[in-house]
Image (cartoon, rainbow, N blue to C red):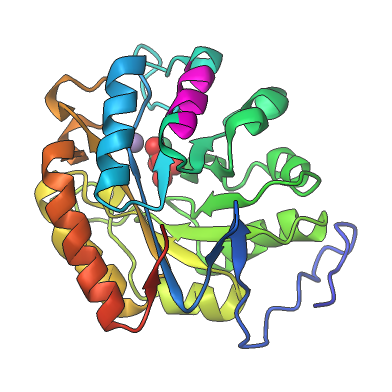
Amino acid sequence: MGMASYRNGDVHAETESATRATVEVRGLPLGPTTFALIAGPCSVVASDVTLRVARDVKTAGATMFRGGAFKPRSEHRSFQGLGRRALPILAEARAATGLPIVTELLDVRDIEAVLEVADLVQVGARNMHNTPLLKALGEVDCPVLLKRGLAATIDEAVKAADYIRCGGNERVVLCERGIRTFETAYRFTLDLAAVPILQDRSGLPVLVDPSHAAGRRELVPSLSKAAVAVGADGLIVEVDEDPDAALSDGPQQLRSRDFAAYAAEVRRLAEGEGRQMLE
Ligand code: PEP
Ligand code: MN
């Protein structure tokens, strides 16, 4: 695939070809014939709970473990995450379960610390337009989970991915996590039609995050089914032991005791679509 340079403002990666890439995360091939189920708490708070949730999602068949160390919160008084103190906890979770770790890099100044534990480094929705961060991640040897901005068009999301790819890092996975519309009955509008279009225009794997879209846990199973049906290459879903006690995004997190049934249903549907669950 011929890649353009940053200097040429109106040229981006050649993404017209319908062939879709497979992106490896610690040997796990994310792509058109597989299905990834990434699960874990919104934010990492304590080591004991984090390890229990990691073991629960591993037992239920999750592909990777997610957990936020650095949290992009709307309100400055809200819990901002444990920051660097959460990183050893994530490393412990990986050592205990073998699950690859997905965590967000919020600030380019933390890139080295975060990459020590991240197997798939997340760029959150609020940073999709942060070009210095995208450029920095173009130069690292770590796959990137790039979430579509909450007010970004499909074209802008593909162009953000090209910032990373043009820097030399081809291992990018996109994620549809809901966009802001006039609707207020749920948190964001999950743009399912974006999934096949993003896949086609970028050639990259595309995940769906039903948790941040819904904002409410009772909507998560049905949005997950819809994501499988529309051809998503995986899901990233928030799960905590006691979401009511969570310091961020409690209402949208599945309870870890309910996760096994949820994961079994996702597996059944994904396999029905001819995909191999990654574990
Ligand atoms: C998250 O994954 O915890 C998160 C903050 O997601 P988003 O960037 O999609 O809001
Ligand atoms: Mn969250």
Percent x, y for residue 237?
Answer: 30, 48
Image quarter hosting the C terminus: bottom left
Q: Identify the residue at horizontal 50%, vertical 43% (top origin).
A: 100
Does residue 18 appear anywhere in the picture?
Answer: yes
Q: Quadrant of ligand 2?
A: top left
Percent x, y for residue 3?
Answer: 84, 70
Most prominent secondary structure in the magenta stretch?
A: helix
When asked about the image quadrant of residue 222, the answer is: bottom left
| Numbered disc total | 0
Along the viewing direction, whichever of 129 and 114 lies nearer the viewer = 114
When asked about the image quadrant of residue 127, the answer is: top right
Residue range highlighted in magenta: 86-95
Q: Is residue 26 above or below residue 76?
A: below
Percent x, y for residue 247?
Answer: 27, 20
Along the viewing direction, whichever of 175 and 53 lies nearer the viewer = 53
- Locate residue 157 relative to residue 224 in the image: left or right: right
- Locate residue 51 relative to residue 239 in the image: left or right: right
Q: Is residue 9 above or below residue 243?
A: below
Q: Identify the residue at horizontal 76%, vertical 71% (top origin).
A: 13
Q: Residue 273 lies in magenta, yes or no?
A: no
- Locate residue 245 relative to residue 100 in the image: left or right: left
Q: Residue 89 lies in magenta, yes or no?
A: yes
Image quarter hosting the N terminus: bottom right
Does residue 156 appear anywhere in the picture?
Answer: no
Q: Identify the residue at horizontal 22%, vertical 74% (top origin).
A: 269
Q: Is residue 259 above or below residue 51?
A: below
Q: Identify the residue at horizontal 39%, vertical 63% (top origin).
A: 234
